Amino acid sequence: MTVDQITYSVFGIVLVLALVFDLGLLSKKNQDVSIKQALNQTFFWVGLALAFFFFMWYEKGQGLALEYLSAYLMEWSLSIDNIFVFILIFSAFSVAPKNYGRVLLIGILMAIVFRILFITVGVALVDRFHWILYVFGVFLVYTGYKMFTSTEDKEFDPQQSKIYLFLKKFLPLVPHDGGGKFMIRENGRPVYTTLFVVVVMLAAIDLVFALDSIPAVMGISRDKLVIYTSNIFAVLGLRSLFFLLRGAVNQFDYLPQGISIVLVFIGLKMLGEHWLNEWFSKSELVALSLGVIMLCIGGSIFYSIFMRKPGTPDKL
């Protein structure tokens, strides 16, 4: 077996065993997850991602391992935005806390499948049309600029979203969870519950977020292994991160500004790739990307803890 085949095999085996361990020992069916349980699960998934970083270092070398770590941190920080939207979706459809874990798991597994397809198409396009990277670069700079300068907090309304309206138009929906089921029968015909709607919306919303995150990861690394593994590890950690941060996610007022600076930096890096490669070595660019990501994300989180925006409640 080649080094790539060994690495992919280890990654697949570790994920299967980790999911079995998480579902079998760390999670309890139809029970709300406590902060302590969420903390244990978060440590588990982050620890697993970091263990894979050291495995990558051993198998593929320092450069690729640091690219993976940078990409993972980028995805992990962007996932906090996902959590805010997930909270709104659960609230809008009155999902019972005991169903959170199961619904999140199915939605996230669907999101992984969609991301794999999305990444595969994106990588194939870049391999064939290299100029697409410059389109991604412009898109990231624009997205980061709009995120940084945004002064309006437009709250997402799940029941007015195009995804929900599409499902409502083509599927028979009922306004309840069917006792924890995704589909039930009423008047002799199958109907879909709010839990089914929420699962579809979680997967679809994550795909929308992937429009930002996957180009950003490709700005950090072009290696397929790095792109796939960093995305999957970050998405798998979403469930535990949701339970850990659901009560505190609104406290990170300045995190979007930190993320926006990173997006602009990566976009400019993609646009100036030709000249940067003449001035810096690949290892120096990877180290620079990692430093900017850690500084911006960590700095914005700490700044959010000690400062608050005008008109917002005091920090807890």
Image (cartoon, grey):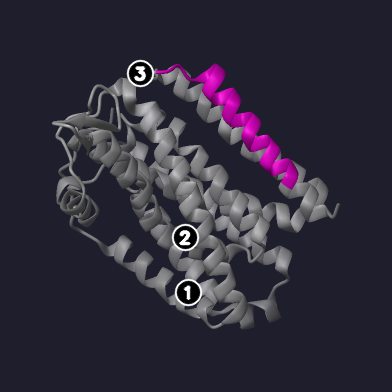
Percent position (x, y) of residue 296? 47, 53
Q: Residue at x 18, y 32 (%)?
A: 188
Instruction: Kindly report which numbered mark, 3 or 2, lies closer to the viewer in this rendering.
Output: 3
Q: Which residue is mark 3?
A: 32
Based on the picture, tell me whether residue 48 belongs to the magenta stretch.
Answer: no
Q: Position of residue 282 (x, y in %)?
A: 71, 68
Could you say which is closer to the camera, residue 283 or residue 40?
40
- 28 or 150: nearer the eye? 28
Q: Which residue is mark 2?
A: 262
Q: Which mark is residue 137?
A: 1
- Label 3 environment density (alpha carbons within 10 Å; few <14, some 14–19, many ≥20): some
Mark in front: 2 vs 1: 1
Q: Does residue 144 sit above or below 159 in this rendering?
A: below
- Residue 288: percent from the left, percent from the top? 62, 61
Q: Is residue 137 left or right of residue 225?
A: left
User: Label 3, label 1: how many angstroms apart (C-alpha)?
Assistant: 41 Å
**Residue depicted at x 16% and y 36%:** 174
Mark 2 or mark 1, which has the lower sequence index? 1
- Tag 3: amino acid: Asp
Tell me the element at label 2. helix
Q: Using the image, determine if residue 206 lies above or below residue 282.
A: above
Who's the residue at 59% across and 50% down the image?
230
Q: Where 313 falls versus 311 (above or below)?
A: above
Q: CA distance from mark 3 to mark 2?
A: 35 Å
Magenta stretch in the rendered image: 9-29
Where disc 1 sits, the SS reads helix
Location of residue 51 by image quarter: top right
- For the residue pair 282 and 99, the one nearer the viewer reads as 99
